[in-house]
Image (cartoon, rainbow, N blue to C red):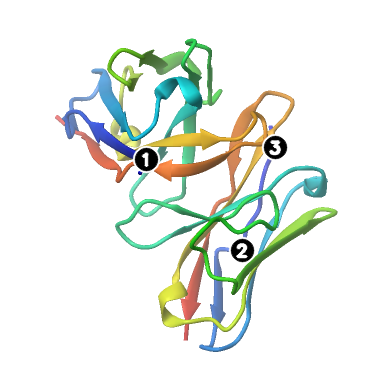
């Protein structure tokens, strides 16, 4: 059974960098594209970006200047860094697997999500 | 950038049929995926590629896509179907993922 688990600090200070890691089990990270999605409290889903095991990435243009997504195939993990955070970046952050061919793939497995609060 | 429009809310009585729409320019030419999200939980894929049901999803869930509107249909609605529903496509000009704003389904 494929499982994804987000990990990282739940509290980040304004202007600092948010860092999260997604650990994948039950599947090889080299088999699919992997993505980060976030959801501010009480709001809808926002796609952040995706990565392939080769390191190829694509990001939401609204966040692109602040987002770095990387992959560590030896640990079967991928990571998100979001710089210069503000209160508007407070959200539940999900990692998810993309199944299918980009650009038609679906998110078929999701992590449970982790709440990151930006506050001093 | 490509925009998807969903009604904020839909209400339906138990046992009736709920239809949740997702509007977009020529969305019929794209593959649409639908997700169900219950409070405090991660989204779950309920329809993929317009009308396919992933394993474990009841037959009561179906989808269609034509012209400028994709539709998620839930037949014989149950209390347990109460959730937020999101449509998702790809903006093929940029290979970016696009989500609709979400629809809250209320079972009366």
Is B11 displayed left or right of B37 in the figure? Answer: right
Q: Residues within 10 Å of mark 1 (few under 14, many from 20)?
A: few
User: Is disc 1 in contact with disc 2, using a CB cutoff of under 8 Å?
Assistant: no
**Residue pictured at 46% horizontal, 35% vertical:** A97
Q: Residue A2 carries which label?
A: 1
**Gap in Å between the C-alphas at discs 3 and 2?**
17 Å
Q: Name the residue under label 2.
A: B7
Secondary element at image label 2: loop
Q: Residue B2 carries which label?
A: 3
Q: How crowded is mark 2: few (under 14 residues within 10 Å), some or many (20 or more)?
A: some
**Gap in Å between the C-alphas at discs 1 and 3?**
31 Å
Is A81 displayed left or right of B53 in the figure? Answer: left
Q: Which mark is residue B75?
A: none
Question: Does residue B70 lie above or below A78 as drawn?
Answer: below
**Residue pictured at 25% horizontal, 41% vertical:** A115
Residue A40 drawn at (x, y percent): 36, 44
Residue B72 drawn at (x, y percent): 65, 64
Q: Disc 1 vs disc 3: which is toward the camera?
A: 1
Q: Which chain carries label 2?
A: B
Secondary element at image label 3: loop
Question: Does residue A48 lie above or below A39 as drawn?
Answer: above
Whether discs 1 and 2 lie on one chain: the answer is no
Is A72 displayed left or right of B103 in the figure? Answer: left
């Amino acid at each position: 059974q494929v499982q994804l688990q987000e990990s990282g600090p739940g509290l980040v200070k304004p202007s600092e960098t948010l860092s999260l890691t997604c650990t994948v089990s039950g599947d090889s990270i080299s088999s699919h594209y992997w993505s980060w999605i976030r959801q501010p409290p009480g709001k809808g889903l926002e796609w952040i970006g995706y990565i392939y095991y080769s390191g190829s990435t694509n990001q939401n243009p609204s966040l692109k200047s602040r987002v770095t997504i990387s992959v560590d195939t030896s640990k079967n993990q991928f990571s998100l860094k979001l710089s210069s955070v503000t209160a508007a970046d407070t959200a539940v952050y999900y990692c998810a697997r993309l199944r299918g061919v980009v650009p038609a793939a679906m998110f078929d497995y999701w992590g449970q999500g982790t709440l990151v609060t930006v506050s001093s | 950038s490509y925009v998807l429009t969903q009604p904020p809310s839909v209400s339906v009585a138990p046992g009736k049929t709920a239809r949740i729409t997702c509007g977009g320019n020529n969305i019929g030419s794209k593959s649409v995926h639908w997700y169900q999200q219950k409070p405090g939980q991660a989204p779950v894929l309920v329809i993929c590629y317009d009308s396919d049901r992933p394993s474990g999803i009841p037959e009561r869930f179906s989808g269609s896509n034509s012209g400028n509107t994709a539709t998620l249909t839930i037949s014989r609605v149950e209390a347990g179907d109460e959730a937020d529903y999101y449509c998702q496509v790809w903006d093929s000009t940029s290979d970016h993922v696009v989500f609709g704003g979400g629809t809250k389904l209320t079972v009366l």
